[in-house]
Amino acid sequence: MLTTIPRGTKDILPGTVHEWRYLEEKIRRLCTVFGFEEIRTPMFEHTELFLRGIGETTDVVEKEMYTFSDRSGRSITLRPENTASAVRAYLQNKLYADGNITKLFYIGSMFRYDKPQAGRYREFHQFGVEAIGEQNPLIDAEVIKLGASLLNQIGLNDIKLKINSVGCPKCRPVYRKKLQAFFKDKFDELCEDCQSRFNRNPLRILDCKNPHCRELSIGAPAITDSLCDECSEHFAQLQRHLTAIGVEYALDPRLVRGLDYYTKTAFEFKYTPLGAQSAVLGGGRYDGLIEECGGAPTPAVGFATGLERILLALETQHLLPAQKNTCDVFIVAMGENATQPAFKLLHQLRDSNIAASMDYAGRSMKSQMKQANKSGAKYTVIIGDDELSKNIASVRNMKDSEQMEIPFDTLIDKLIFEVNK
Ligand code: HAM
């Protein structure tokens, strides 16, 4: 127990951290290019925020939240997603103050009591963006393009974008009625979850993973046939903008997202080889959420992507970068007299921003050379009695095994020069 982590969590070990950093660096650069600024919100919030924000009838709220009372009896929840928190931070800190569109991005841990399997964890990491304060479909297209550019830049070309419009509070009730009429005769055959969705949120029946429910929903009316003029025009414009900037997409009238706050645009990027976890990136517009959280009516659109899923997709396509060696110089000290001069050199090099290492256990020359090789150092400095008596160090270029003798007083300058060459 003491040496095992909780189910659905994962250590990110030194051998793989560089993969995360690679992805995170791409994300940060792309967000800068697109004009999004980073925000970091707390990992836990008042439970009420998620109940109101995400919707009480969603799977996330009903089954997946890590909710507990703190020592003062307040109900606290580990964030299952970051859109509600971003909106809370936007309102609390008046990020709307200059009246312009507010473009935020985040990278961080989210928590859902999900059934763990490949690509699905209980603590997972999302990168997400939220563009708050603009209703023009140009911003929907910009947000989608940002997602597409990320996946493209890391080489994931096999990804399919699906888009839909889930309407607004004006047209969705009409569609709900049509859907209920369609499923009425099939009600008894629906799974238990869908039977409860029938009244509370019939759109979610279209998203059920149960094969029989999927079969039953064949031929269901498409929401895009029930959209009001405003939603219909917004959706048509979005498609024109996407085409104009070269983003390929397919229409999917069955695409409904798992969180309740969506209005108008909904989209998902899918990487089918990941099977049940094929949704690598998803999002949409949420024009009612800011008002729901106590702000003035404010349109907004965003997405989030699961970093574990992206890394898994990169792994299956052999697109992960190799780990780079970080050690520049390895110092081999032979014999007791050499230890302290070597230790001093180690720290002089580090003070000069050179990545340096040495062995502290007084191991044999052979064993220290093995360590030097393993460290990937560009140069190995050997100091023994012989070198000390001549006031020099032997410096080996690990690439061509050429060895030279360098006087101590020029050693550091020489190593700095060689390493930075
Ligand atoms: P979501 O679809 O619930 O949307 O999650 C977004 C992405 O997070 C998914 O496409 C998936 O890649 C990843 N994900 C979700 N659950 C897990 C899990 N248990 N393990 C690993 N990865 C997971 C949202 O969270 C919205 N906040 C997105 C958004 C932002 N909409 C507007 N703005």
Image (tube, rainbow, N blue to C red):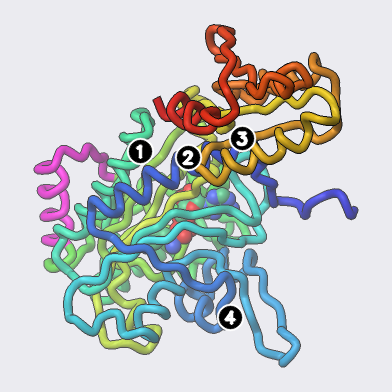
Q: Amino acid at mark 1?
A: Leu
Above or below residue 206? Residue 317 is above
Which comes sooner in the sequence, label 4 or label 3?
Answer: 4
Alpha carbon distance from label 2 to label 1: 8 Å
Q: Amino acid at mark 4?
A: Thr
Magenta-highlighted stretch: main secondary structure?
A: helix
Which comes sooner in the sequence, label 4 or label 2?
Answer: 4
Camera-nearest label, 4 or 2 = 2
Q: Residue at x 27, y 66 (%)?
A: 103
Please give the range of residues in magenta. Answer: 232-251
Residue sitting nearer the eye, 27 or 290: 27
Alpha carbon distance from label 1 to label 3: 36 Å
Q: Is residue 191 left or right of residue 1?
A: left
Mark 3: few/some/many CA within 10 Å (<14, 14-19, 20+) = many
Quarter of the image with the C terminus is top left
Q: Residue at x 63, y 68 (%)?
A: 65
Alpha carbon distance from label 4 to label 3: 48 Å
The residue where tag 4 is placed is 47
Q: Secondary structure at mark 3?
A: strand
- Label 4 close to label 2 by CB (< 8 Å): no
- Label 2 close to label 1 by CB (< 8 Å): yes
Q: Ligand 1: does it lie within 8 Å of the C-beta at label 3? A: no
Q: Which mark is residue 310?
A: 2
Above or below residue 6? Residue 394 is above
Please state the horizontal and vertical placement of residue 32, each as a whole percent of the image. Answer: 27, 54
Q: Ligand 1: does it lie within 8 Å of the C-beta at label 2? A: yes
Mark 2: few/some/many CA within 10 Å (<14, 14-19, 20+) = many
Q: Which mark is residue 151?
A: 1
**Magenta-colored stretch includes residue 126:** no
